[in-house]
Image (cartoon, grey):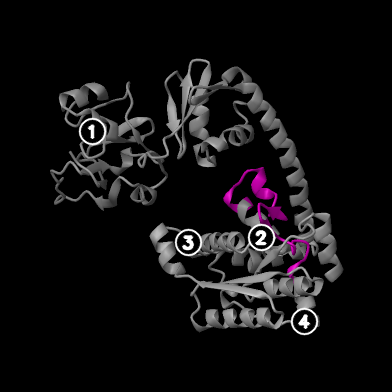
Amino acid sequence: MLNKFLNYIAEKDLIKKGQRVLLAVSGGIDSMVMADLFVKTGMADGIAHCNFRLRGDESDKDEALVMRFAKRHKLAFFSISFDTMKYAGENGISIQMAARELRYHWFEEIRKKHRFDLIAVAHNLNDNIETLLINLTRGTGISGLTGMKPSWNHIIRPLLFATRSEIAVYCKKNRIRYREDSSNADTKYTRNKIRHNVIPVLKEINPSVETALNETAVRLAEVNEILAEFIDRLFSRSVVPGNNMLKIDLKELEPYKDNTTVLFELFRQFGITGARLPDLKHILSGKTGHMIFTQTHRIIKDRKDILITELPVDDPGAGTANSPEELKRAESIESVRIVDNTPGFNIPADPALACLDLKKVKFPVVIRKWEPGDFFYPLGMKKKKKLSDYLIDRKYSRPEKEKLLILESDGNIFWLIGDRIDNRFRITNKTRKVLIIKSLISR
């Protein structure tokens, strides 16, 4: 194991001579084995431990074990305690994602402050193939099937060569103390379902499934390199930089208009996700003026070109909500509710509230600034009206016009936020579910 460890570091060129390495050690078997290997090879310079306060006294015992290890081997020790539950709630993310964000942000702070060159984390080969299977299950591009990288920025993963069983054998043979996280057995977590339920079945089919999947990931990584080179060449051939925008020649994209892989890889840098690919294909084959907004860019069809402009970073409203839950998190929105359209339901006379027929609102919903050429059907009117004319009639000042945000569904404006809804989305006697959106602003 020790020789494999050194050979892997050399093969992947993970640590250069003279570089200082900070070890991320949780107290679990993987990180304690990694710490032991680093100590025996004389490459350890410090240990960092995060207490996520998720398991009460157990979390404190993890920290105590790692601290004793660092003290015994005279290594600099850094620790921090996080209120992970609070952070997850405030940011609307899962506990696992919260813990990940907190630890990597803190690791980088420690690395810079104490002048470490690298941060070593203890992901192993099994972690790698579990990630591959999770991504495959959820749907992903080729890059999502390439597994974890041995090194990325200042992060290195020197145990990616070792299976979990190899680590367990080394641990037992060298009598390394570690602590077991009871949550690792809880199959309510996706990774644990893969680990405890899926992998064992795959091993019945192929006892060497870990090695086979890892080799597949390596080959896909090589394929991804070829694809990346192709995309770079296509991008260079197709794109003409302009003033604050990029212009893509549709003629160059014609051979790939139905190839979702090429389109995804080419446009993902502009915020296109797998869910937005149908919208992108519609824009490419649609009429001049058709557009979509991502979290970062506007993509618009202009005759024989696609124009891409970056959204202002100080625009708090622009973006896309793929569900009512996501819409709740928009900075201009206070709340989102769905209620039954019962006989006793009354529509509030409040411009800050939009009461809409849920069936008519299709997600994803685009939140954006209004633009010249926009139109809608003001509530109570059967004819469309230019938004610019409506704003003049309503005596909007220039600052009010600049701040106005709209909500758009399937290319149709359905609410001038804080002002008026579109007549096509109104509640009727056929409405069964009502979508109620409350804005933080009103006119």
Mark 4 vs mark 1: which is more N-terminal? 4
Mark 4 vs mark 3: which is more N-terminal? 3
Indicate the amino acid at tag 1: Glu
Residue under the point 81% across and 81% down:
173
- Residue receiving disc 3: 94
Q: Residues within 10 Å of mark 2 (few under 14, many from 20)?
A: many
Q: Is residue 287 above or below residue 91?
A: above
Q: Mark 1 or 3, which is nearer the eye?
A: 1
Q: Would residue 284 be counted in the magenta stretch?
A: no
Q: Residues within 10 Å of mark 4 (few under 14, many from 20)?
A: few
Residue 12 versus residue 230: which sits nearer the camera?
A: 12
Give me the C-alpha separation between circle 1 and circle 3: 37 Å
Q: Secondary structure at mark 1?
A: helix
Query: Is there any visible trace of residue 149 in the rendered image?
Result: no
Q: Residues within 10 Å of mark 1 (few under 14, many from 20)?
A: few
Mark 2 vs mark 1: which is more N-terminal? 2
Q: Quadrant of residue 255?
A: top right
- Residue receiving disc 2: 130
Q: What is the magenta range? A: 136-164
Indicate the amino acid at tag 3: Ser
- Residue receiving disc 1: 400
Q: Which numbered tag is attached to residue 172?
A: 4
Mark 3 vs mark 2: which is more N-terminal? 3
